[in-house]
Image (cartoon, rainbow, N blue to C red):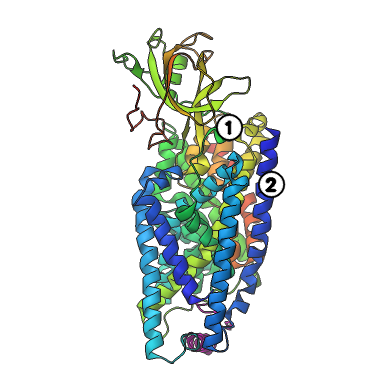
């Protein structure tokens, strides 16, 4: 790989990262929010490395010979001699001979800059068993607001583990996207990641009585628990009798089961 | 479902064919060294290649944009692939910067003084020293390579390579958070990882052969008459581009398995204890989850016994697809194949033995 191309590759990778993390929220489709400072730092380092490589090699070019390549080559020979001089038996490998595998780094860089893939959605969620919710023994009393904003995990926990049955008869409001279920109907879904999109897991709540919606539509659903199984035990199914279903913007923090950061437009 | 599966496999096939010539590219790298004879011809060839590359890329992008890329399977594949690459990028940069710095600034005698003279003793010491590298497995490969270049005995460097991603405080904290109220899991992970890395180091002393290793050509240390900063910058750049390319190969392979094999298949294996241990060990290799996240994934595999989950988090940081790709690129393929296979066996045995006592 030629030096110019190495410079181009480093700078493009850096700009790609900065574009995804500093100038937009693209990175949230792939990794956790906490990665942001590290990714920005990486972008800056890559750009600096590329610029340094370009600037220093040009300087070497000016002070050396007429031909940049000849100069670089001369240095190869230099390193080579050194290696042999020390009896290491190296075969004249220096840093300008970056293997062709490095070309592959253009793919993520250009992908981020030109054609970033969307966040994981219904396709992934439909192929995975729902994430098991964490055990919880003590439940605080629910706030009196109605409809009560609640996360899908919290709702599932309340339905399956809360002996006090505080959720009974309460109207709740949850936000997620639509994953078509196998036997018709759909699940309200959230994908949760703990580090990056490769470890995605999903929580799902079956919605009864809602309109048919295309996959990956983000909606806010209000309704009450759909009685099925004994409430407060593991036999209870996390399902909702929908009263209203309204489309919302996809929240910025799509890969969490938090309450959405973006206020929905039709409350 | 059938249609989607077909597409996922198709995506897999595309990756494999794309990756195949690339893996061999490492061996051909030497050929790339022969630069153009005249600067003019070189310049011309450079621009031609650039133009050709740009046109091909645009073609690919448009083909991709129009055609199959809009199917959910391919989109999910690209998302996971990009996610693994992005997730690993800061750690890879950290590791390659560290490796460049070790090469340029640290004299070889520092390591010979720090480590015990006898290799058999140096191995466990190096394994425990893995505690100091806070990061995931991508950082440890280039660092281990530069350690070998600085005169550290390969066995000790490999013990460090295997233990560093599993026993550092960041990863252990993540494990404690993922398994609340279960400190035995953290302890078991620490001990099993240290044991497996030490055993692998000793195994290398016993059976390992130098010729399996590609000579660490670039890490010849500081040369008289060169600027240390310049050496650092060049080493950093070379290592990053080199390891980065292999990281993309590994990410592609892992994304293929991630998308092609739905997680719901797992439940069929959770019944038998022994089968589930082996199955989760295999899954750790295929999923290539970062060592800082694998505890959360393990915690979510609720159908499996704690022993199987321990195996998952012990094997994961030591052997996985992106690591095998990185090792093949750094140390050569003959090494990567033997080393990964042996590590897999040793890691499973260590986690079964230690997990059997503690869990």
Residue A211 appears anywhere in the view: yes
Report the mark closest to the observer, 1 or 2: 2
The image quadrant that residue A90 belongs to is: bottom right
Residue in view at x 37 percent, y 21 percent? A150
Q: Which residue is mark 1?
A: A128
The image shows residue B339 at horizontal and vertical percentages of: 63, 59
Residue in view at x 62 percent, y 36 percent? B262
| Location of the N terminus of chain A (image quadrant) | bottom right
Label 2 secondary element: helix
CA gap between label 1 and label 2 equals: 20 Å
Discs 1, 2: same chain: no
Task: Report the chain holding disc 2.
Answer: B
- Foreground residue among B312 and A220: A220
The image quadrant that residue A12 belongs to is: bottom left
Which mark, by number, is residue B6?
none
The image shows residue A255 at horizontal and vertical percentages of: 43, 36
- Foreground residue among B171 and B266: B266
Q: Which residues are magenta?
A: A72-96
Residue B352 falls left or right of residue B147 = right
Residue A52 falls left or right of residue B249 = left
Compared to B258, does A98 lie above or below?
A: below
| Location of the C terminus of chain A (image quadrant) | top left
């Amino acid at each position: 790989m030629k030096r110019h191309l190495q410079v181009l590759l480093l700078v493009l990778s850096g700009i790609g990262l900065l574009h995804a993390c500093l100038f937009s929220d693209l990175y949230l489709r792939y990794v956790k929010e906490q990665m942001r400072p590290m990714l920005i730092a990486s972008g800056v380092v890559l750009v600096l490395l590329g610029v340094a490589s370009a600037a220093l090699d040009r300087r070497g070019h000016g002070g050396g010979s007429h031909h940049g390549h000849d100069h670089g080559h001369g240095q190869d020979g230099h390193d080579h001699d050194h290696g042999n001089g020390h009896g290491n038996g190296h075969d004249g490998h220096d840093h300008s001979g970056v293997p062709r595998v490095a070309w592959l780094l253009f793919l993520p860089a250009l992908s981020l800059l030109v054609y970033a893939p969307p966040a994981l959605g219904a396709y992934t969620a439909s192929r995975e068993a729902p994430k098991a919710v964490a055990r919880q023994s003590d439940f605080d009393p629910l706030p009196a607001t109605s409809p009560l904003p609640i996360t899908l995990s919290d709702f599932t926990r309340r339905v399956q583990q809360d002996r006090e049955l505080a959720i009974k008869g309460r109207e709740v409001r949850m936000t997620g996207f639509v994953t078509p279920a196998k036997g018709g109907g759909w699940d309200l879904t959230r994908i949760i990641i703990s580090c990056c999109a490769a470890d995605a897991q999903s929580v799902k709540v079956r919605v009864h009585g809602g309109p048919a919606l295309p996959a990956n539509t983000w909606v806010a659903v209000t309704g009450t628990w759909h009685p099925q199984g004994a409430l407060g035990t593991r036999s209870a199914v996390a399902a909702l009798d929908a009263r209203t279903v309204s489309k919302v913007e996809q929240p910025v923090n799509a890969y969490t089961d938090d309450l959405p950061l973006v206020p929905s437009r039709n409350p | 479902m059938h249609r989607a599966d077909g597409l996922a496999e198709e995506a897999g096939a595309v990756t494999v064919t794309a990756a195949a010539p690339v893996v061999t590219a490492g061996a051909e790298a030497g050929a790339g060294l022969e630069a153009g004879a005249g600067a003019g011809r070189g310049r011309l060839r450079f621009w031609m290649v650039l133009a050709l590359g740009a046109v091909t890329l645009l073609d690919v992008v448009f083909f991709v944009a129009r055609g199959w890329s809009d199917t959910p399977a391919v989109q999910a594949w690209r998302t996971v692939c990009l996610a693994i690459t992005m997730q690993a990028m800061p750690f890879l940069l950290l590791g390659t910067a560290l490796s460049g710095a070790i090469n340029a600034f640290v004299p070889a005698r520092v390591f010979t003084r720090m480590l015990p003279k006898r290799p058999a003793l140096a191995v466990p010491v190096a394994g425990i020293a893995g505690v100091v590298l806070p990061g995931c497995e991508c950082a440890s490969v280039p660092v281990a390579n530069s350690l070998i270049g600085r005169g550290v005995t390969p066995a000790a460097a490999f013990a460090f390579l295997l233990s560093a991603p599993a026993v550092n405080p960041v990863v252990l904290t993540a494990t404690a958070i993922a398994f609340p109220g279960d400190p035995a899991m953290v302890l078991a992970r620490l001990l099993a990882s240290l044991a497996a890395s030490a055993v692998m180091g000793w195994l290398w002393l016993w059976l390992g052969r130098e010729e399996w290793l590609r000579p660490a050509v670039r890490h010849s240390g500081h040369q008289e008459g060169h600027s240390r900063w310049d050496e650092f910058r060049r080493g950093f750049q070379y290592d990053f581009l080199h390891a980065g390319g292999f990281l993309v190969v590994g990410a592609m392979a892992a994304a293929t398995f991630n998308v092609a094999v739905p997680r719901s298949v797992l439940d069929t294996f959770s019944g038998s204890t022994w089968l589930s241990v082996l199955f989760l060990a295999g899954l750790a290799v295929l999923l290539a989850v970062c060592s800082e996240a694998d505890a959360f994934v393990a915690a979510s595999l609720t159908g499996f016994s704690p022993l199987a989950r321990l195996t998952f988090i012990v094997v994961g940081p030591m052997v996985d697809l992106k690591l095998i790709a990185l090792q093949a690129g750094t140390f050569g393929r003959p090494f990567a194949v033997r080393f990964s296979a042996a590590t897999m066996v040793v890691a499973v045995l260590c986690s079964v033995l230690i997990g059997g006592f503690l869990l």
